[in-house]
Image (cartoon, coloured by chain):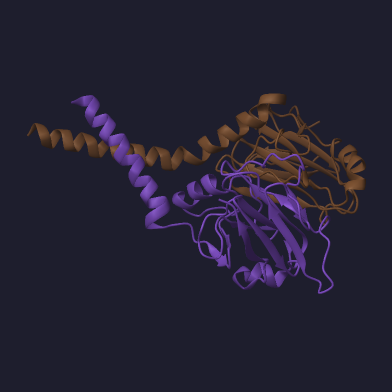
Amino acid sequence: MKIVKWLLAVLVIAAVTHAALLYFGPSLVMNRAMAVVAAGSGINTMSHAPRPTADTDRIVRSSPDLLYSICPYDLGDGPLRINAEVPPGTYWSMSFYDMNTNNYRVINDGQASAGAVLIVLMKAGTLGPAPAGAELVASPTPRGIVLIRTLINDERSLQAIDTVRRRAACTTLQMPLE
Amino acid sequence: MGLAALVVGVALGAGSLWYMLFRAAPTPYVSVGIWRMNPLAGSTGNDPYSRLRIAITSILALNKSETIYFEALADNDGAPLTAACDYTLIGQPPAARWWSVTAYGPDDMLIASDSGRYSASAASATTLATGEVEIALTPDGSGPNGIATGSGRFELLLRLYQPAPDLAAAPESAPLFRLVKGACRA
């Protein structure tokens, strides 16, 4: 009888472990990524990583041909304003990831035809009217990461590209929307 | 007794999850020569197992309409890529707005080298008269369009930014760089 109880306990613990890792695994992975990128500049702040090299590499499989700007976000204190300029003549994209690691939105340089992007990022289900000139984006989870990739398509343009991409920023907005 | 049940239960739960993720339903790679592509990269998984598999294998990847990633871990015979051998990649430039090949160590980080030659790309690579591109994979990055492979094992990542619609629709038919194995050192 004792062994049956023991086996039942093992099965219950195994099932709970399996389900917990399955359910929380993606957010654990994302939490770790957020901790790495937020270590330098914090949450709701855009940091502009130096060009990846073997010495500066912090994220697995970074591309040495891209410049990464990254904003780990938490919408708990309100929506996030994200503004960026798009360097001309090269590939650029702003991608949005939720805590399940889903890439739920991408805006690339072809879609940002005005040469600049202004986004208000809000929790799903709380969308209101967009401030003038801004596009509303709904985040499926209150926390996540916005990642901007800028391609160094010409080494001679590196400084100019770097200067423009460093103008990207993210800041928490107060409600009602500023 | 209680601690033993806890340890065995946790191990069983974690082990069964690993089995479900990577054995019962392994990542559905699309293979082209030495290259393989994870079609789940950047996608939004519909079931919890897919979501976790994406989180583990391709965090912060772009979806495949924006970028396709092909990786290579082994040569044409299935032997792991190693800096003990020289290799050459050769082929027509892939049909994409921009492409690059980058070498990473077994830890998925860039490989340190004096030359700093981490990658070859549409911007940096010179082409042959045939229109093909030749990329040398050598420990110090010497050779045409060379990439440094350091010491020990390495892997390659081919990025195709904004791939041509035909390629995005049928990546299994993409004409990609072929690998030619050169001399090996003891």
Q: Is residue A84 left or right of residue B65?
A: right
> Is residue A137 depicted above or below A50 in this figure?
below
Q: Colour of chain A?
A: brown
Closer to us: A45 or B102: B102
Query: Residue A178, how many percent across, how many down?
Result: 81, 31
Q: Is residue A18 left or right of residue A77?
A: left
Q: Please tell me in which quadrant of the rendered image residue A125 appears.
A: top right
Residue at 76 percent across and 32 percent down: it is: A46
Q: Quadrant of the N terminus of chain B?
A: top left
Query: Where, by quadrant of the figure, is residue A97 drawn?
Result: top right
- The spot of residue A149 in percent (x, y) is 76, 45
Residue A9 visible to the viewer: yes
Left or right placement of residue A133 versus residue B12 in this view: right
Residue A78 place in picture, x, y as percent: 69, 29
Front-most of A39 and B88? B88
In depth, the one of B131 and A1 nearer the eye is B131
B115 in relation to B32, above or below = above
Chain letter for the purple colouring in the rendering: B
Q: Identify the residue at image location x=50%, y=55%.
A: B46
Residue at 87% x, 54% y is A113
Locate residue B139, reporting x and y percent.
67, 48
* Residue B161 visible to an observer of this rendering: no
Of A71 and B84, the residue lying toward us: B84
